[in-house]
Image (spheres, helix red, strand yellow):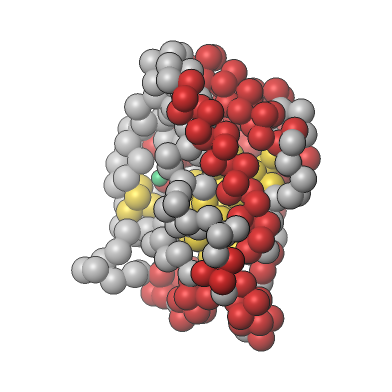
Amino acid sequence: MKAPSYLYGSIQEALSYGANAAMIYTGPPSNSIRKDPEMFQIEKSKQLMERSEFDVERLIIHAPYIINLANSIKPDIHDFGCTFLSQELKRAKAIGAKTLVLHPGSHVKAGMETGIEWIIKGLNQVLDSDDTNVKIALETMAGKGSECGYTFEQLASVFEGVNKKDRIGFCLDTCHVHDAGYNVHDVDGLLAEFDHILSLDRLLCIHINDSKNPKGSHKDRHANIGKGLIGFDALYRIVWHPALRSVTKILETPYIDGKAPYKEEIERLRIG
Ligand code: FE
Ligand code: FE
Ligand code: ZN
């Protein structure tokens, strides 16, 4: 979904698509909820959630892309990411969200191992002094550029290094895992592998996207549902998989002719 800064507007928008979940960005870095809590219209939003089908447990925050904990080449970027992430956790808590999706980061030519070390260092620095209880869902990446976290094993290494393990979960992005080389058509096989390496208990969110590119392409270009190389059938089976019933599903599909496609895509995924 796009990035509206106002919580109330985002929930209204989500409801207009027939959704009971939403993923939002808290806005550009200069927006600090401490300076202007009214901006998010938190009370008004809570009331709207309560009187509608919207489930506050399914309100997901996506951390901004400027956070790169894996950058050991420019430690300033890593430090900035830590500071920003800890503020973002506080914003998420103030908004009432329980989950913050985070891209693990890019190692920028320092190598995967070093990247993962720095992600662990950053997460520990942030979480060791954080009491918000908001969970960080590390997203499965496509492996574009020097992205870390495009295999379940890489994410497991991050998890292993974090002290506060109860604060870490995962977000599975169907386009990303497909682009990373996983066979999304074998839904049961994919989930078994995920469960074995990361545990389905820690799966907090699924990004439902088709992909414009073939499996293993490491491209990360999202396609509309049924319009890509994953196809409708596999995505439908993921949405309705019994093991994933309680997991929040979010669309991140591209606009069509300048219009959000979510209402139609949700309807199609509901009906089959
Ligand atoms: Fe993401
Ligand atoms: Fe995603
Ligand atoms: Zn993506």
129 displayed left or right of 13:
right
Please tell me which residue is depicted at 45% across the width and 14% down the height of the picture.
111
Which corner quadrant holds the N terminus?
Answer: bottom left
- Look at 24% across and 68% down and name the residue there: 258
Residue at 70% x, 50% y is 134
Residue 95 placement (x, y as % from top left): 63, 63
Q: Position of residue 30 (x, y in %)?
A: 44, 52
**Residue drawn where x is 53% and y is 55% of the image:** 32
Q: Nearer the viewer, residue 98 or 140?
A: 98
Q: Residue 54, how many percent across, how many down? A: 62, 75
Toward which corner of the image does residue 253 lie, by quadrant? bottom left
Can residue 134 be seen from the camera position used here? yes
Q: As drawn, which residue projects farthest toward the left?
A: 257
> Depth check: 54 or 40 in front?
40
Residue 208 shows in this picture: no
Quadrant in which ligand 3 is drawn? top left
**Does residue 102 appear to the left or right of 28 in the view shown?**
right
Q: Left of 174 or right of it: where is 245?
A: right
Q: Is residue 53 above or below residue 125?
A: below
Q: Is residue 271 shown left or right of residue 49? A: left
Q: Is residue 237 above or below residue 199?
A: below
